Image (cartoon, helix red, strand yellow):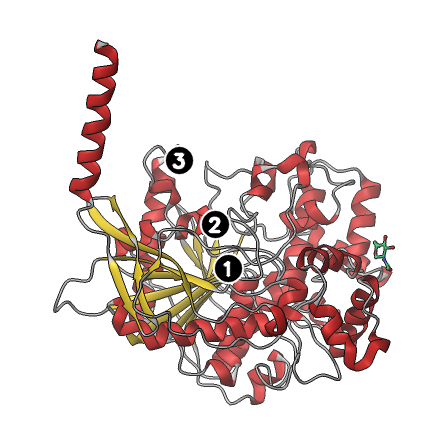
Amino acid sequence: MASIHFATLIVGAALIAIAQTNPTSPVLSTTLGDVVGAERSLFGKTVQVFYGIPFAKPPVGNLRFRAPQAADPWGSAPIDGTVKPNACWQSIDYSFDSHEGVTAWNPNTARSEDCLYLNIWRQSPDVGHHPKTIMVWIHGGLFWSGSGVLDAYEGSDMAARKDVIVITIAYRLGPLGFMYLENNAEVPGNAGLLDQVMALQWIKDNAANLGGSPDDITIFGQSTGAISIGFHLLSPLSKGLFKNAILQSGSPTAYWAVMKTKKAVDRVAKLAANVSCPVSLGDQLLSCLEGVDPEVLTDQQWILGDKWFDVPIGPIVDGHFLPSHPECLLKVGDVQPTNIIIGLNLHEGSIPVLRGFEEDYPLENQGLLDREPFRSIMLTIAEGDATLLDELLSVYSSEFEDANKRRMRILDAAAGDSLIKCAVLEFARAYTLLGGNVYMYSFEEKFKSSPWPGWMGVPHGAEIEAVFGDPLEPGSENEQSDKDLTKAIMELWAFFASEGYPKFRDVEWPAYTTRYQEWVKIRSKDVRVVRRPRKQSCEVWAYHQFA
Ligand SMILES: *[C@@H]1O[C@H](CO)[C@@H](O)[C@H](O)[C@H]1NC(C)=O
């Protein structure tokens, strides 16, 4: 009896504690209706979160594949913003026995076509306070995966520590987001990118309602999120929707970022045939594809890839969102240049190589590799070009000394340059010539919390946990130096978002110039400005543009 009574007391105490810290649920008024959210106490601040705000009509039924349509007002009853929204359709990844470094990026909510929602974290707006800076996160995932509500993109730490309004958005993925029908103007391609535009428009329209300002919005994103941001910097449709931009490990000029239209047409035909909607159906093709189970469409896209690194179905030059290829837009586009931070991680290539060559390059081998698989992987990265292979071997061999880990480092460097780094450097150069203010970084600190083995270095995506403040969470096992660097990076991101130039510790951070090509090495110790990074190797790649 006594123990039951004791338990009742504890439950009673817990209920009172909740009632005291959360006397009323926060309500957000938007142009379309009210949203009831939840509150969380963090670092002595109260953070409000509103999940699942619709910014477009659910793209279902005969809205599938089409450009998004603005959401309708939902009337006087508020919607429930305490529940994380559905993820857009995507395949689930179980690679490497469901390794944590893989599964952390799988959706953590149900998958559905009804997925066009955004999520907001903020401190309660104080009356009369200066409007807060808004930071909008565009997730990566190679245009076939990702979600705005992954734990990795939890915005409350940033909202609590930096007093910015953090927003994450969703966009359609894979065949549902990037279907292109050559002879049907209703499906002109790039629907997923138009979803992003619509979300940005909603945010601008509602900035004041959120406690922010429509003229103080910064977009930030990683990988294909950064590539998307590169598109927004160049697209006439995104003009005026944001002020500054942060591109983490991605450039729209990467050779794989935009698919040739001919290739997209061929791939759509192949996918359509596979799901029993052959292109020969003509006018009936669209209605046939509309009837296919979204999971089938999503899972069958994998028959389309034909290279070691491939986006099965993604962005194209549609003549509308992308009037021409990003490289052309950077030269002759009608672009209003702004302030950007763009940067890279030290070992961008290690995850793509691990994943692209799972059999030859196993996770357990501590980064050691025999000569034969090494040469064969390198030849594949060189797309079968034996002359390029020789050039690559000679240019990268001089770069590394540690003989034991050398082959792995060379593959990482070659893949990282080819897939990401050289395109990012090229974007920095072209955007500077266009009149933009560019600040470059290279993130080079391996955090204790990284799920990947040590030999993979500072891989693609490693900086995300610093940007979102994970090492500062209670219970984190990170070193103090990781925590200090996390604080500095959060300050750098938030300060740049509001001011348009970087502040990082006591570093004199020069704007990028085409002459010196400066970047800042971000790490715990020995932060330095480097000139003309990766010049030699990127020159080799510049002569071998794959498509
Ligand atoms: C679709 O592709 C899968 C995987 O390659 C194959 O097994 C199946 O036979 C294909 N279906 C049709 C109708 O082509």
Callout 2: helix, strand or loop?
Answer: loop
Q: Is residue 425 above or below residue 381?
A: below
**Which residue in the protein does label 2 denote?**
150
Q: Position of residue 211 (x, y in %)?
A: 24, 68
Tell me the quadrant of ligand 1.
Answer: bottom right
Q: Is residue 384 above or below residue 7?
A: below
Callout 3: helix, strand or loop?
Answer: loop
Residue at the image point whose x is 84% and y is 71% from the top: 278
- Which amino acid, by three-letter code, is at mark 1? His
- Which amino acid, by three-letter code, is at mark 2? Leu
Q: State the mark number for residue 478.
A: 3
Q: Are marks 2 and 3 in contact (CB under 8 Å)?
A: no
- Which amino acid, by three-letter code, is at mark 3? Asn
| Nearest the eye: 91 or 70 | 70
| Nearest the eye: 430 or 97 | 97
- Give the number of the mark in front: 2 or 1: 2
The numbered mark, 1 or 3, whose residue comes first in the sequence reads 1
- Judge whether residue 35 can be spotted in this image: yes
- Rendered-image quadrant of the C terminus: bottom right
Q: Dot 2, crowdedness within 10 Å: few (<14), some or many (≥20)?
A: some
Farthest residue, direction top = 1
Callout 1: helix, strand or loop?
Answer: loop
Residue at the image point whose x is 54% and y is 78% from the top: 430
Measure the C-alpha gap from mark 1 to mark 3: 24 Å
**Which residue in the protein does label 1 denote?**
139
Measure the C-alpha gap from mark 2 to mark 3: 21 Å
Q: Position of residue 294 (x, y in %)?
A: 67, 59
